[in-house]
């Protein structure tokens, strides 16, 4: 079962973060809990910094997410994504975890609406499908849950992962 997300109402980011925070608290937590940190600074968007925090292996402390991705505009937190991967697990297992998290988020925040469903044309036997649900309780604030599945007909292999994204465009 998917662990609690530690978010509070209304659509606050998880892990005790707050909208508008600087990266400092997240960096200190990552250091304190021995998590790897990756910083991205896209050249095309010099005001944007992306901080990805993840363990070398396994999940985040006390959680089933495998990575936390925080986005900062001019040093202020405006988006947090929790990424869930289950290496070695069947896609059906990941789909079950996704469905369970959708139920939890629906109970906590209200019904999520289908946002998008895509299916790319197979390329050399590889098929990609994505399903997204979203909730926008107030202008500029949103919660999105996205499942991505990849299946390889040639190798008889498939994998899936999902993310939950908290966004506040008002920061």
Image (cartoon, rainbow, N blue to C red):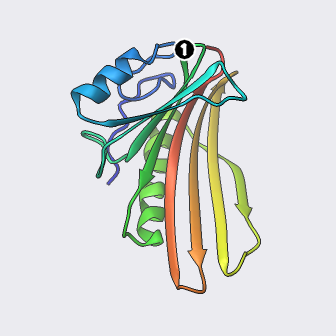
In the image, 107 versus 145, the foreground residue is: 145
Quadrant location of the N terminus?
bottom left
Q: Residue at image x 31%, y 41%? A: 60
Q: Residue at image x 36%, y 17%? A: 25
Q: Does residue 21 sit above or below 69 in this rendering?
A: above
In percent of width and height, residue 156 lies at 52, 85
In percent of width and height, residue 64 lies at 33, 48
> Can you identify the residue that label 1 sits on?
76
Quadrant location of the C terminus?
top right
Q: Residue at image x 31%, y 43%? A: 55
Q: Does residue 145 sit above or below 153 in this rendering?
A: above
- Residue 124, by quadrant, is bottom right
Q: Is residue 42 left or right of residue 120?
A: left
Q: For numbered disc 1, what is the local secondary structure?
A: strand
Q: Residue at image x 54%, y 37%? A: 165
- Is any part of residue 16 visible from this angle? no
- Is any part of residue 37 visible from this angle? yes
Q: Residue furthest right?
A: 121
Q: Is residue 79 left or right of residue 87?
A: right
Q: Does residue 65 sit above or below 129 in this rendering?
A: above
In the image, 90 versus 8, the foreground residue is: 90
In percent of width and height, residue 103 lies at 46, 49
- Residue 100, by quadrant, is bottom left
């Amino acid at each position: 079962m998917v662990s609690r997300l530690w978010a509070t109402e209304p659509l606050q980011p998880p892990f005790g973060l707050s909208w508008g925070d600087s990266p400092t608290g997240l960096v200190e937590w990552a250091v304190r809990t021995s998590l790897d940190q990756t910083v991205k600074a896209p050249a095309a968007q010099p005001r944007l910094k992306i901080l990805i925090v993840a363990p070398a292996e396994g999940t985040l402390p006390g959680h089933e997410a495998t990575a936390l991705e925080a986005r900062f505009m001019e040093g202020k937190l405006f988006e947090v994504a929790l990424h869930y991967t289950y290496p070695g697990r069947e896609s059906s297992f990941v789909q079950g975890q996704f469905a369970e998290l959708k139920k939890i988020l629906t109970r906590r925040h209200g019904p999520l609406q289908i946002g998008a469903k895509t299916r790319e044309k197979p390329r050399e036997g590889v098929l990609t499908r994505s399903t997204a649900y979203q909730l926008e309780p107030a202008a500029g604030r949103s919660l999105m849950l996205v499942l991505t599945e990849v299946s390889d007909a040639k190798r008889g292999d498939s994998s899936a992962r999902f993310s939950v994204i908290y966004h506040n465009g008002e920061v």
